[in-house]
Amino acid sequence: MRVLSLLSLTLAVVGVTPATAQTAATTNVADGSLTIYQNLGRLNVTVSLYQLLQNINLLDLRNLLNNTSNRYTFLAPSNEALQGVQPLDWNALLRYHILATSALAANLSASYQLESTLLYDTAQAQLPSYQEGQAIVFRPNQTAGAGGVTLTGGSVGTDVSIIQTDLRASNGIIQIIDRVLEIPAKASLVAPRIADITTATALLNQAGLFPRLEQARGLTLFVPNNAALSKLDIILDGATMTPTRPSLNTSQLADLLSFHALVDQTVLYSTRIQDTIQVQTLEEGSLILNRSASNDIYVNNVKVVRADILLANGVMHIIDGVLDPSRAVQKPSGSTAEVASSAGSPAYPQLVVANLLGLVALAVLYL
Ligand SMILES: *[C@@H]1O[C@H](CO)[C@@H](O)[C@H](O)[C@H]1NC(C)=O
Ligand SMILES: *[C@@H]1O[C@H](CO)[C@@H](O)[C@H](O)[C@H]1NC(C)=O
Ligand SMILES: *[C@@H]1O[C@H](CO)[C@@H](O)[C@H](O)[C@H]1NC(C)=O
Ligand SMILES: *[C@@H]1O[C@H](CO)[C@@H](O)[C@H](O)[C@H]1NC(C)=O
Ligand SMILES: *[C@@H]1O[C@H](CO)[C@@H](O)[C@H](O)[C@H]1NC(C)=O
Ligand SMILES: *[C@@H]1O[C@H](CO)[C@@H](O)[C@H](O)[C@H]1NC(C)=O
Ligand SMILES: *[C@@H]1O[C@H](CO)[C@@H](O)[C@H](O)[C@H]1NC(C)=O
């Protein structure tokens, strides 16, 4: 019996006895007069999940899913989805599968959107407001037909699909999903998993910046891709400087990278960047964010090439240029395409800034 073997596997993992479970599990149809929790106990596809919820440590979650005062959407992992999953904290992981509103698949698949979950204020999510839950990205999946939607949580590149939609309960909606969503991790763990930002990741490590970024309650981090940084070819502390390559010491490098970070403020998921806005960076100076007619997002005229990589405390966007703090937006200049190459000791020697629309865009330069 397939169901039985799944069941015993789950029981072994959470250490509960079958005696505590009173599952009927004889149907594929939800009963709208019963709660989400009660329906989980009736549906064949959620036998494992229901058994899991019998865990003594999940009492609050059980009560929440059985409480008729609020309405939720439970993105419920199927029996297959739960196989082999062994998180440190089931309560946090399952809360990351509950949306604070009741949403039909048609609504979730209507447009690219980020939805807030009930995972907030824990060791695993540090967003600016205690009421703001960690997010999940939803995007329409035409291949899957009408109502088709792909979900992405914290796991880079792991897509999750809704395989049974709109099971209506008295206190919300159950959407059955084919994989467990991963809770977004810290920046220092996420960044190394992305192939085209290995240079920026190494520089962030060298600058010792990750701890500062990770302690922020709310982080928006713009990360230049490898192509953008290869044009800079920064030489770090102590290396022999040649006239054509910028040499930075560690604190200058940290300043440069800090100009790419917004901390302790509203997390700017791409969906929150609709109009042109100006934001303050961790380094002195501010950035201008906007959305073009073709729906691309720009930061100081540098394009976001991959948006909304979720982090424990915010979001990361990959950009195809480097933002230059020596040309912060408060000081828009004329139309010269020349830099801080004049007198004194410029903070970023050899960087040539192309001045677009009076804003900053670093164009380049290493000969
Ligand atoms: C639910 O699973 C049981 C076996 O555990 C099976 O007998 C029953 O037919 C299934 N019900 C539906 C509606 O698929
Ligand atoms: C769940 O809620 C229903 C309706 O309020 C109630 O009858 C039932 O006893 C509750 N079940 C549990 C396990 O709390
Ligand atoms: C249900 O939720 C409401 C609102 O959050 C709360 O006031 C109430 O105590 C809860 N009921 C139970 C039985 O937990
Ligand atoms: C959700 O979808 C339904 C049916 O497609 C639609 O009538 C309703 O306006 C949508 N609600 C939201 C909040 O988008
Ligand atoms: C879109 O849906 C199809 C069909 O269900 C599925 O095979 C595919 O993996 C989905 N694509 C993504 C990106 O999730
Ligand atoms: C880095 O270089 C700048 C400019 O030369 C200098 O002011 C600063 O003291 C240096 N910092 C360190 C830690 O060496
Ligand atoms: C946003 O920035 C891009 C790149 O500089 C520019 O082409 C576009 O016109 C800007 N859009 C708005 C609405 O300002």
Image: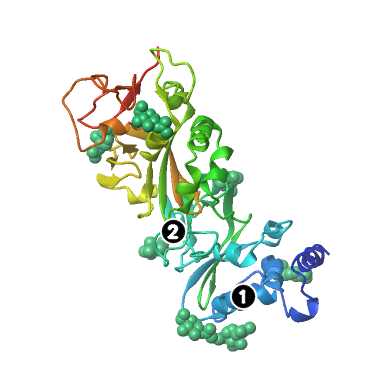
Answer yes or no: disc 1 within 8 Å of ligand 2: no
* Quarter holding residue 14: bottom right
Q: Residues within 10 Å of mark 2 (few under 14, many from 20)?
A: many
Indicate the secondary structure of the residue bearing disc 2: loop
Residue that appears at 33% across and 40% down: 295
The structure residue drawn at horizontal position 57% and vertical position 53%, both measured from the top left corner, is 161
Q: Mark 2 — residue? A: 127
* Labels 1 and 2 touching (C-beta < 8 A): no
The residue closer to the viewer here, 256 or 72, is: 256
- Confirm whether residue 115 shows in the render: yes
Q: Position of residue 169 (x, y in %)?
A: 54, 75
Residue labelled with disc 1: 39
- Please rate how many residues cluster around mark 1, counting C-alpha atoms within 10 Å: few if below 14, some from 14 to 19, many from 20: many
Kind of residue sitting beneath label 1? Asn
Q: How many marks?
A: 2
Regarding residue 322, the answer to whether it shows in the image is no
| Residue in the picture at 40% in, 59% down | 128
